Every structure is written in structure tokens, then in C-alpha cells.
Image: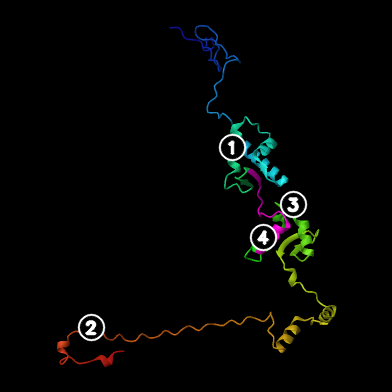
Amino acid sequence: MALLNPNSAIPKANAPSPTPSNSSTSGAKRKRPTDDAPTTIYSQPIDTGTGSHIFTQVTYAIEHLRNNDRWMTFQEITDYLNVPQVDDHTRSQLETIFRRPEQNRIEWNPKNNTYRYKPKYDIRNAAQLKGYLQNQRSAQGLAVRDLKDGWRTASEEINAMGKRNELLVTTHKKDGSAKTAWINDPSLMHTVDDDFKNEFHKIQLPPNPDDLRSKLIAAGLKPSSAPREIVIAKPKEKKKKAPRRGGKQTNTHMASILKDYSHKRK
């Protein structure tokens, strides 16, 4: 038997290719898909972004109504939004949103089918402001920044009403514009004589607050800085319960035999 020489060449098998071959076992080449072949798209909506487009149109409509500050027809609004009349779907959606009860920025008048901007307060002039302040139950003031939402010239007109004593107005220190407005009655405004003003300003207050407090106490007045007296309530004494008497008595037939110990009850 012949021994194999380790240095002799041994035929090796070819390693498999890492990439598949384009030719099949029969020798025919595979065809690549052409660019003109139709592609299938699965689960795609017909009109993406329709909702955001509608509410963008609503935002533009609200801003347009606010800038014009008048009643407008639906056709005027859609003309501004460039919505064609043949687009029944968009027009129907806009009309439904405009008429929703929860739509707090568009006011709809069903009598003539018109729309206008609805601010936080339904106040658009000086007469409406005075009427609102007179009819409210509290004496709360209104912030001018809220009134300017539906009344552009609110700050200037409120300042003028304050000078006529029709309103009580606080202003910003920076530019003097109106900040808050309250109702005022001009008939309660009285002028003070200059002599009285001079006598009032002649009164000098003590520089030390303790001296002012002692003078008020000496005059029999109670200063506002006086400490509050804390009254400690005494706990109520619990009443002792009276012994229970009465009730149904038993063994009445042995009353002559049994002794009476009722006087020993505590």
C-alpha cells in the first residue's frame, strides 16, 4: 500500500459564492423589474392632511372676521379663503364647524345666515362697556387687554371716559395706557376747597410709627397695628349623667319581702 506524501497537491473544492448567481440551474438569466411596472401601495388614505387643512382654513376665517369686525355672509368668507363653489365637501365642513355651539370664536346669526367674530366680552363701544359694568352684580373691574380683543380702540376711549369721570381707570406706568376699568358715578365726584387741602397737608405725622400708635391709644382710638387679642375658649364641663330611674319594675309580688336599696345608688 502506497503512503500519501503530505507535501503532494490535493485538489480542493471551490467555495460557494457569497452572492446568489443571476443564472438559474438551467442557465437562463433572471429578468429585473422594469421601471414601468405598476407598484402596489397598501393601506394608504385617499386624502392625507384633510383635517389639518380644514382647521387651518377655520383659523384664517376667524382672523378675517376679527379684522373686519362686522357680520359677513358665508360666501364672503369662502371667497376670502379661495374655496371654489364646486368644492361641496370643504364648504360643508366649514359651515358645520362655524355653526357648532362649542365654537367660541365665531358667532352665527341663523336669521340671515351671517357670521362675525365673537370676543371674550361682547363689548365693542363705550355704551356697551358702561351697560355691562352697570348690570354686573359685583364691582369687579375689566382688564383692557381682554376688551381690546373685540374693541380695537378700547384703550384710548377708556382713557377719555376716565378723564370725564365716567369710569375709574388704572393705567400702565410705562406708557399711560388704560389697564383696568371700573364703573363710576360722576354725581358722587365733589371738589374739595383749597383751604381744606392746605389744612390737611399741614398735619405732620410722627416719623416714628410707635409714637403715632401711642397717640392714637391716648386719644381712645384703636390703631390698625394693634395686636389681635386671642381669646382661648375654655373647655366645656361635661355634665354628669343622672342615674336612670323608672323603667319597668319586676318582682312586685315580693315587694314586702325584699329590702329597698335604692338609696345606696350612686
Q: Which residue is mark 2?
A: 248
Nearest to N terminus: mark 1 or mark 4: 1
Nearest to N terminus: mark 1 or mark 3: 1
Q: Position of residue 93 (x, y in %)?
A: 59, 37
Front-most of residues 82 and 174: 82
Q: Position of residue 192 (x, y in %)?
A: 81, 76
* Mark 2 surroundings: few (<14), some (14-19) or many (≥20) residues within 10 A: few
Front-most of residues 22 and 84: 84
Magenta range = 114-134
Q: Which colour scheme appears in the figure?
A: rainbow
> In 3D space, how far apart are the residues under numbered discs 4 and 3 (Cα atoms)?
18 Å
Q: Position of residue 118 (x, y in %)?
A: 65, 49
Q: Quadrant of residue 165?
A: bottom right
Q: Which mark is residue 152?
A: 3
Nearest to N terminus: mark 4 or mark 2: 4
Q: Which residue is mark 1?
A: 93
In this view, which residue lies farthest toward the front?
111
Front-most of residues 233 and 117: 117
